[in-house]
Image (tube, coloured by chain):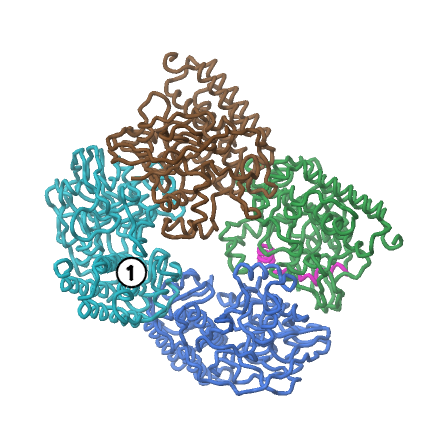
Chain colours: A cyan, B blue, C green, D brown
Amino acid sequence: MANKFNIQEYWQRFTLIRAETEKICQPLLPEDTVVQPIVDVSPPKWHLAHTSWFFEVFILEKYLQAYQVFNPLYSYLFNSYYNAVGSRVMRDQRGTLSRPPLAEIYQYRSYINQQMQILLHEQSESLPEEIWPLLEIGLQHEQQHQELLVTDIKYILSTNPLLPVYTPATKQAANTQLPEPAFLPVPAGFYTIGYTGAGFSFDNEHQAHQVWLPEFKVQNRLVTNQEYLAFMEAGGYQVFKYWLGEGYDLARQNNWDAPLYWVKQQNEWFRFTLNGLQPINWDAPVVHVSFYEAAAYANWAGHRLLTEFEWEAAAQVYRPEPQAKSFLEAGFYDPQPATNQPANNLHQYLGEVWEWTNSAYLPYPGFETAPGALGEYNGKFMINQMVLRGGSCATPISHIRATYRNFFPADKRWQFSGIRLGTK
Amino acid sequence: MANKFNIQEYWQRFTLIRAETEKICQPLLPEDTVVQPIVDVSPPKWHLAHTSWFFEVFILEKYLQAYQVFNPLYSYLFNSYYNAVGSRVMRDQRGTLSRPPLAEIYQYRSYINQQMQILLHEQSESLPEEIWPLLEIGLQHEQQHQELLVTDIKYILSTNPLLPVYTPATKQAANTQLPEPAFLPVPAGFYTIGYTGAGFSFDNEHQAHQVWLPEFKVQNRLVTNQEYLAFMEAGGYQVFKYWLGEGYDLARQNNWDAPLYWVKQQNEWFRFTLNGLQPINWDAPVVHVSFYEAAAYANWAGHRLLTEFEWEAAAQVYRPEPQAKSFLEAGFYDPQPATNQPANNLHQYLGEVWEWTNSAYLPYPGFETAPGALGEYNGKFMINQMVLRGGSCATPISHIRATYRNFFPADKRWQFSGIRLGTK
Amino acid sequence: MANKFNIQEYWQRFTLIRAETEKICQPLLPEDTVVQPIVDVSPPKWHLAHTSWFFEVFILEKYLQAYQVFNPLYSYLFNSYYNAVGSRVMRDQRGTLSRPPLAEIYQYRSYINQQMQILLHEQSESLPEEIWPLLEIGLQHEQQHQELLVTDIKYILSTNPLLPVYTPATKQAANTQLPEPAFLPVPAGFYTIGYTGAGFSFDNEHQAHQVWLPEFKVQNRLVTNQEYLAFMEAGGYQVFKYWLGEGYDLARQNNWDAPLYWVKQQNEWFRFTLNGLQPINWDAPVVHVSFYEAAAYANWAGHRLLTEFEWEAAAQVYRPEPQAKSFLEAGFYDPQPATNQPANNLHQYLGEVWEWTNSAYLPYPGFETAPGALGEYNGKFMINQMVLRGGSCATPISHIRATYRNFFPADKRWQFSGIRLGTK
Amino acid sequence: MANKFNIQEYWQRFTLIRAETEKICQPLLPEDTVVQPIVDVSPPKWHLAHTSWFFEVFILEKYLQAYQVFNPLYSYLFNSYYNAVGSRVMRDQRGTLSRPPLAEIYQYRSYINQQMQILLHEQSESLPEEIWPLLEIGLQHEQQHQELLVTDIKYILSTNPLLPVYTPATKQAANTQLPEPAFLPVPAGFYTIGYTGAGFSFDNEHQAHQVWLPEFKVQNRLVTNQEYLAFMEAGGYQVFKYWLGEGYDLARQNNWDAPLYWVKQQNEWFRFTLNGLQPINWDAPVVHVSFYEAAAYANWAGHRLLTEFEWEAAAQVYRPEPQAKSFLEAGFYDPQPATNQPANNLHQYLGEVWEWTNSAYLPYPGFETAPGALGEYNGKFMINQMVLRGGSCATPISHIRATYRNFFPADKRWQFSGIRLGTK
């Protein structure tokens, strides 16, 4: 087993990732971890527990000898959506559960960590190979919930009239000059889409396959708040022709006239951030827009969104590198302006904001679901969602790759979602 | 002023009542004080703050010189429904507010207590007479919220699959034999309905007026769980003819087949209580039934509910005395069986459960609303609610009197509401 | 039997009333008889059929030998709400039924008429006494639906942007001068409330009983459009203190700022009527107001609504007579101004508009439901409704009496409901 | 102009197509043309008017000199969703409009026909070229509504407990033997997707572009009722793993356990059809299934749905021919069994049922919307819908082609939608 799965290395990652989750929740009060202002958002307490439940149900209960479940009711309380695992608290009722209290959830996390240690250190000889992918997916899953924790905490605090500050704005990104916008060409040709490497990847990145693409161009950086403001000021939210019909109706019903978290006070725009209400950095990428707004903006600008295949092909051509400042660990919790590097690079391609593509979330040719409950991981969501690519300022840097397919319904805005333009 | 309003006595009551509210919340964790599982229920944190807000807005802001508000946003956060006071957090959004945290709410309470002390002790000479009723209503209001705290805490804990225990069941009511049911006659005649005494009363108890009533009879004790079970087992929930149409439809839609909090496990009935899930005490009064169920039971039993006028007249004839065991301070938080006293007394008339009457909540002749925001206290609710009388095991004993008019919509079950029969 | 129930007289009434129903529908196109713009309104086709179904189910099926049902499915299609009779088309789905077509419904009506003739003329010797009240209630029921036909037709046409005219405005009420408003005293005393005569009455008018009333006053005529406009122009719809809380919220949500059917065009008010859109007759009674609006108006005016007991007592004292011009048969389908008679009469007391009282619809002492399905006639509605008295311009003149209790939820406006003031 | 646009030919088509629409409605009673049982379904009266409104607004008002609109309010009444044209009756309120009556709608149609004749015959010299595509799209639009008329009439009649017969089942398809199921290979390669011919096509079929496809196989005929029954009897509706998550939840909520219109009576399955309730022809294609059911069936069968690109490529390889029996004009209004031709043909590829593909409805590369209101024709719907291909038994035969892209949300079942399997 040693040459295939390095337990020491895994345990190190396990320890770090599990600690990172708790670090994200460290500024929260117990009260903050309970509420669920909208159904999309889960209480932080629930995330903390659910990520441990995942290890308990899929690994410890099956592979640790004489494992004692922490609390038999947790299986019901902290199941998210795995139909194969049994019934669960309805998603829209998560915010009604005051118990177990936060302190007990932390005990649960400790217990799971300790039991995982026993499994990996005392029973490592007897672990079957089938457990390897489960161990890996447990960490990947926890990283996904780290991003959700950040977005959900932001939403929870934002609905509070006291506008609480999660963390003071001590960090400052380097002062830079924004690169000029430019459209970089990607030549026509066959591109391999999907994951082909040796590391971890999700089922929905498979099977890798050839896609033929005609030539197109991709913009060198993300659309900025300044640019998006021009769309707003040109009446973009009111002019039907830029919009998908559903999106236009939605914007009318909800009085959308700016991205989520924008607030106008005394005729000046501010944004709610995890540092509290802040003046807008006009060079920073626009974020917290729905697919509808992204598509309307692109239409108004006379361009379009890329498909997910184009997005991935451009990454192969320009090979953008992830930068530490663009991810969760940098602690900005907000996308930063592009730095003034050569204009013919793909700036901000990984991290900062998830980029809406004009691709529906559908299976790749030959896609197959895993057997059992983990088969529900990605496949059952392949309808009525759009693909986003590239990761965000809330994504752990080790979690992203160019083939990673994120997906959300077209109306969602609470994720760090933004806009990159493409064109003919 | 001294001979009209005794400040020392008031301050003593103020101190006790304010402390009682916090005592009710003492067993709660911060997490318990945030959630709002249904719109009827308010988070305990909200009750703790709102009762202080009441003193701040109606008394301190107006009468304490140089009063500094604790936090200007609290006026928005903790207004319940006083349209005259300004806008407010929508009632169904109270459970989304994680901040201010519980600890800060307690600071707010301390601050208000301290400021009230200043007002009453340092500025007592300058207090205008108009403040006297406001001071009194502040305490009455807080007592009303003590009852709501108990009922809301019970509901919050009940929706949790862990079935948390608020307080262990250490208390035991005296072992007694249930009085035989008997109908006690009340003679025809003129009765004075409404408050005529010198103490405090709410606006809705006025004006006292003469009502002529024909002879009727009132049952000597409350309907018991045992008696209600007979209705259930006779198919009472399924037979249309016993029901009001709306009630029957509601029972179908919500699958009502027992009072709220009844749970059947392995063919045996239990009840969720503030002591956790407990076997049913069959001699105890049935409680947590809606008006619809109360009326259907009465029809099935071949009797009827009293009107609120009959209820009050019977109290004048039989003069039941409140008993300590039947109220909040006894700490049962659950109605207790009647004790074996002479059958020709009105047992359990005050305390134990609020008794649904067949009277709609409407103004007495000559009813007038107070000027200003306090005019909203009772009058604006006088539609689509039914009157309940007598107080419950969650009512402070000093808060009840025979003329007290409580009111709830006919479908509500989370209050300690039960049934007393009347008949021709 | 002959000396107790006059078959000839009954048959004459049967023929006239059945014909009147069809006369009301005569101006309608088949398309008009199908739609249901709101759940309160039933398609005219449904009314035409349901009133025949009533005779079929409660009389012909039980008492006519060898009766053949017209169509076995009609029992399901045209049951309104009689739970004891079986299942039925859900009320909110009545507008989805295109079949049976109108022509077939008329065939159904003819068939029922013909079978009733057979029953009454060929089998009259064998009719048991128990059928007499059923025969009577069949006609009373049909008259109730005549009023609903008028109100439902008005609502159906009103929602159509073409503003169709049901009947041209050829009728003109006499030109008159409005009596001066005056409050007429009713002395304190015992009054007999409920029906005590020998004719027909509904179960809810029983048992007649003594009610003691203190002195009060009743206004001599209905509140006019002119007077109501003053309330509107004084901002009455916006000032919370005049309103019940539920009513105020409802008015906000639905943007109520005038009675139903009022339309402002080029800064002038019009009303939709069965004669199409018409200028407002300012002397005519205000109509199509909810209980909430009636109560708010009364508060604003510094007076109040009467209770139903006061209303009935005033009728005993002032003995108002029904006038032909005020009822359905006059064909105005809209309330007319009071005529200039002595000011110390109760003008417009019977007919013109149903007068909201401040009494909830509850049983009289000793109320008993009839056995079987007809027991559902009135009793099961005795919750969350307010009593209206006096009949309207859409009520058949032979259908009204001073003890008649109509009832609707407080938010309903599509009936011909208006306002009479009372005061201390 | 003559060599580019043949007015005589157009007028002939115009006459035929306009008459066909009325022929579809000929069996309907006025009452049938008014109702709207669900929001997806429009009243037939509305379709009859809207197709005329289209010619009025886009052609006559713009190009016919001195054109007098039939009724100025019709523009508001019969606009479907063209935001650029102005406001409109909300879609879910179409079933509340009793007026204009059906007879007037037919007058409207005659008037439009007559005015179009004037335009085309008296003013043909002055017609600008820009009108040619509008004239064509007017007819294509009317053909689309012919299909909707059939599906909406079917739905309307199906909700009626009388189960009305639209037309008796006099037609009989030839008695045939079903071809054995077989998967036909389509080789890998570049395929041109989109319309490249000289005739009419919709904007969404453009731009034609190259797509590279790996090899796949397509089944030679549609999935039959017999085959779908096997899925049902194997518990397919209950087993989560075959389903998309949304679809499974929807099936649970709506108690779906069979295709729309299937009815079980005395343990035997029937289907509601335009010939009334009929025994199931087990060899006929399954129809009225949602995308969710189609995808679940394919999963259960161990295969998959084709993408729309594969579907179109297969058509290029096997060149299936439309057969008269498979389309609207045949008058079956229900899909017929495949006839026993060589197994290596693509049977039922055009007509019978729309085939759900696993492609989301998205723009082709270079897609551009037309300027003005017609730009809303297809583009604004390109979100949250799945593509269907091939036409159905309710599609006019002249309306279909292999590049035609139909689209509906994944939950819709009232269209003639069915299943063809693909595989690796």
D223 shown above or below C143: above
Q: Which amino acid does the dot numbered 1 rest on?
A: Ile
Report the front residue among A273 and D5.
D5
Q: Position of residue C212 (x, y in %)?
A: 72, 69
The extreme right residue here reads: C3
Residue, x 39% and y 20% (percent of image)?
D132
Q: Position of residue B416 (x, y in %)?
A: 52, 73
Residue that carries the numbered disc 1 in the rendered image: A153
State the predominant SS element of the stretch in magenta: helix
Question: In the displayed structure, does residue B239 sit left or right of residue A138?
Answer: right
Q: Position of residue C341 (x, y in %)?
A: 76, 50
Residue, x 39% and y 30% (percent of image)?
D374
Q: Chain of mark 1?
A: A
Q: Which residues are magenta?
A: C291-316
| Quadrant of image for the C terminus of chain B | bottom right
Q: Position of residue C72 (x, y in %)?
A: 67, 45
C50 shown above or below C161: below
Which of the 4 image quarters holds residue C242?
bottom right
B60 shown above or below B244: below
Question: In the displayed structure, does residue C308 sit left or right of residue C130?
Answer: left
Inspect this view and state whether residue B128 appears: no
